[in-house]
Amino acid sequence: MSKTYKAALKEAMQEAMDKKPYSLIIGQGVTDFKGIFDTIVGFKDKYPNRIIESPLSEDSVAGICIGAALNGAYPINTHIRADFGLLIFNQLINLAAKYKYMFGGLFEIPSMYRMVIGRSWGQGAQHSQSLQSLMAHIPGLVVVMPADPSSIIESYRYAIQKHKGPVVMLEHRLLYELSFDDDKAKLSHPLFGSKLEKEGSDITIIATSVMVLEAKRALNHLEKNGISVELINLHSISHPDKEMICKSVEKTGKMLIVDTSWPEYGVCAEMNRIVNEYNPSVLKAPTKSMGMVSTPCPTAKALEDMYYPDVHDICNTVNKMVNGDDAVIDLPKKESMTDFYKHFKGPF
Amino acid sequence: MINLNTSETYRSLFYQAMRIRLVEEKIIELYPSDLIQSPVHLSIGQEAVAVGICANLNLDDWVFINYRGHAFYLAKGGPIKEFFAELMGKKTGQSKGKAGSMHLASPNQGIIGASAVVSSTISHAVGAALISKIKNEKRIFVTNFGDGALEQGVMHESLNFASLYKVPVLFLCEDNNLAVHSPKSERQSFSLKSLVNSYSIPYYEIDEGYDFLKIKQKSKIVIDSIRSSKRPVFLKINTARYKEHVGPGEDFSSGYRNENEINKWKKLDPLISNKKLYSEFLDKIKKEVDDAVKFGIDAPLPDREDLLSDV
Amino acid sequence: MKLTENKIFKKLFEVTSLISASEKIIIKFYNQDEMKTPMHMSFGDENCITGVVESLRFDSFFFGYYRSHSLFLAASRDPYSFFAELLGKKTGSNGGIAGSMHMSSINNGLLNLSAIVASTLPLSLGAALANKTLKKKKFTTIFFGDGAIEEGVFYETLNMASLFKLPILFVCLDNDLAVDLNKEARQGFKSIKELIKSYKCEYLYSSNPDAIQAYKISEKAKDLIKEKNSPVFLHMKYYRYLQHIGIKNDFEIDNINSFEKSNYRSKETHNKFLKKLPWENTFKKMLKIGFDKKELYKIKKRIEELVIKSYQKARNDEFNDVKDLKKKVFY
């Protein structure tokens, strides 16, 4: 049975409102007809008083979420672009993340911050950032990037029903409309784990969010060319499954990280740290990192297409890593993910 | 004066304010010994505000305070032994020694956290009040901040939200005219009353920030109105910070403010002028403070387990 | 004197016509998917912005927000680099890197736009502070929507502008909406006027002006700034004809699951404003002043031809290549 990413989000939100007492959804646009890209349409009438439209006051709204959590609510704060999430960093990082520790365990701030990563179609520098590394760096925060509907259902349920602290969910705009079939692969933990998507022997690819999809496309192509890829969907950015990662790289000897953001000081860097501190001699070749080009995101499509790695780039890199720099295989054509998935025509 | 000295209310308020004063003075006394290794933003001169306000609050009313939090912590009923243990960074401190002076809290007495980032807990009060209204509770939420917080954008966002959603919050501004060393005239260019009123939030001001009785009486009306109407109110109480911004000393020699201003205030300060009551309560309070200090000194240090817990 | 005034009015009419024609081109060709950038259309604010920019173009820098088209065209009067930018071409005003939300025209004083609501307010404050400190005669004009007033940074900026007595003109383009939420749902304050009056800032108001009215009130604002040496807040109301973003209006319904469906605006009000289109208001005012109808239509036609030619030319320009991707990240 297949389900879209956004349908899973809607299901998760529905469950939150029905099963978690005093859950609130608060943010800019939560009561409008667009319903945060269709994930909470109609909620305003169904749950009066609990869907709270906020004025344009991100900082104080994040603080309001903390206050509400202190008084027994479960606030879900939405940001239609992760870039606007930067405006809540004072409350999120100086307060929510530290509240339990700073007061020696007297308080807990169970809360969720949903941020949508924009991409393509001229989103530009301020509507396309993927800020998982900035937040995963902070002790006290849980940062998750669900890459498919079943991950959504499982991790949102756990965060809302069980976890007693702040959780940042980074959702990818490109995934919203896509349909996924039932998942055979399982998360090793809803918030503190990763997912082994496919077993393989020649190379380990670790991917985040929408890049898991692109890696899967690459994987299919590579398999036809005799390359066996082990694919890990990182899922929890702040608390990835280190054992899964290290055991995998130990098996394959090679690691490629494909992230949604810039390689420097990010997920790519952290994966390298994890493996090296485990045992650097498991690596039989230098590792490689793929992510956004290290510039702000340009609006022009011609440039934007160069900005993100795609299935062609992944296949090319994997081939070289496995078969050597001179090896040649048939490569899929260079095609922006957004053109391939063809559904996202903007404007937002 | 003699009448007041026999009034139960006055005596009780005086006792509490004096208790805070003596705690603060004890901290000054201990500071050179390095027993307290935490920056301290002392409440000396501002005790009456906390005492007068808290006299109208119930146990389950919440206060959200800031780094200058000793007065409110003690006035709202925060345990004094654990207070000293906390300042000394001990395992049995209020927050296992991890908070220090700037982040005092005691949920059992409704002291819900303090932050070193100016104005950062104002919106917390609004959020707690918002859900309180949804739950149909009968309590109120006080956010206590200095005049410096008035310039912060989040102040306005919070006033806007509180007004829009009509939540039972008391915005309580303790105005000592200073943000560290800068007076209001160098930082603010607005009429606070006009600004607050434009949010349809009632604005009140109390000048006599040294007079705990007057504060109790006047703030009772304000607090009762919040309880009944469940709508926000803004109350500014003018007060005076006797000591330097942070630390146990005085800083008049640096020249950014006039000692005469504070001397004028001190003349009106009952804790200084009412020597009769002061001497009547001195021994009892001193004993309580000394016992609390001993508790703190004797308390064990936190260990590695404490370092890693509560993340 | 009258000759100079007439020259100004003629310019106002030309610029309004330029904006109107350019927006029409975008609406016509957007679905061809060559302009791949989210657009916050200016259809509705042409008069306000034309009037202010023409009045202040030699006296002020301009800072704006993502609803940029009127501002860019009024400042630069250059439809060619405008379309080239929207089409993502090398020859665009910002080399195709900026798109609709971040255009600039530095030589014409348009310094900065941002997609983050209210984020250019402190920048304008800094520019004004620099102007005062360096004793430059220019002041700073910042355009923003009514949504920006809810952001805390607005108050921080207003406080400092008022405290430091900075020559800033705050132009609030008020369409009552933040995306699709009416102000009653967002604003707990009684009125913008009352808020502003709490600061040491002068307040001026204009509702749905034609371009000449907008010009005149902007001149008044300019004089006030120079005279009082304090910031001025110019509150201009206008009607947003289209959706927050994109070229549809709120009354077109494609299908039930359309992203663009809505029922939060009044059709009655919309129809009322359809009868009072901004360009037409300015046109009528020009007639009233004494301009010849035929001449005005001639101007309109000339500008429409210029606009379509600019668009076609820009379409054929080159895209960027990979060399351009990494340029200009650091200085």
Image: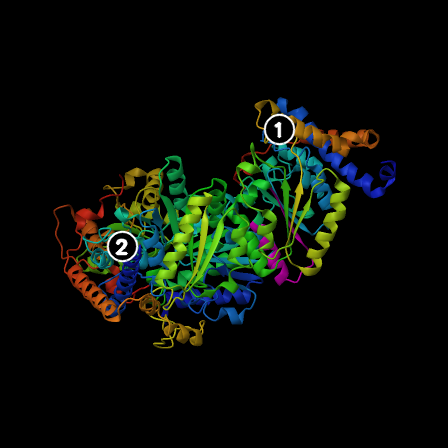
Number of residues whose C-alpha sits closer than 10 Å to that of mark 2, classed few (under 14), some (14–19) or many (20 or more): many
Residue A278 coordinates in the image, percent (x, y): 35, 40
Query: What residue is shown with label 2?
Result: A299
Amino acid identity at mark 2: Thr
x 25%, y 56%: residue = C77
Query: Mark 1 — on which chain does it sit?
Result: B
**Residue B140 in which image quadrant:** bottom right
Residue A211 coordinates in the image, percent (x, y): 30, 56
- Residue B134 is one of the magenta-drawn residues: yes
Number of residues whose C-alpha sits closer than 10 Å to that of mark 1, classed few (under 14), some (14–19) or many (20 or more): many
Query: What residue is shown with label 1?
Result: B36
Q: Are marks 2 and 1 on the same chain?
A: no
Q: Nearer the viewer, residue B249 or A284?
A: B249
Q: Nearer the viewer, residue A68 or C255?
A: C255
Q: Are marks 2 and 1 in contact (CB under 8 Å)?
A: no
Instruction: Please indicate whether residue B136 sits to the left or right of residue C164 in the image.
Output: right
The quadrant of the rendering that contains the N terminus of chain C is bottom left
Q: Nearer the viewer, residue A15 or A39?
A: A39
The magenta stretch spans which residues? B123-146
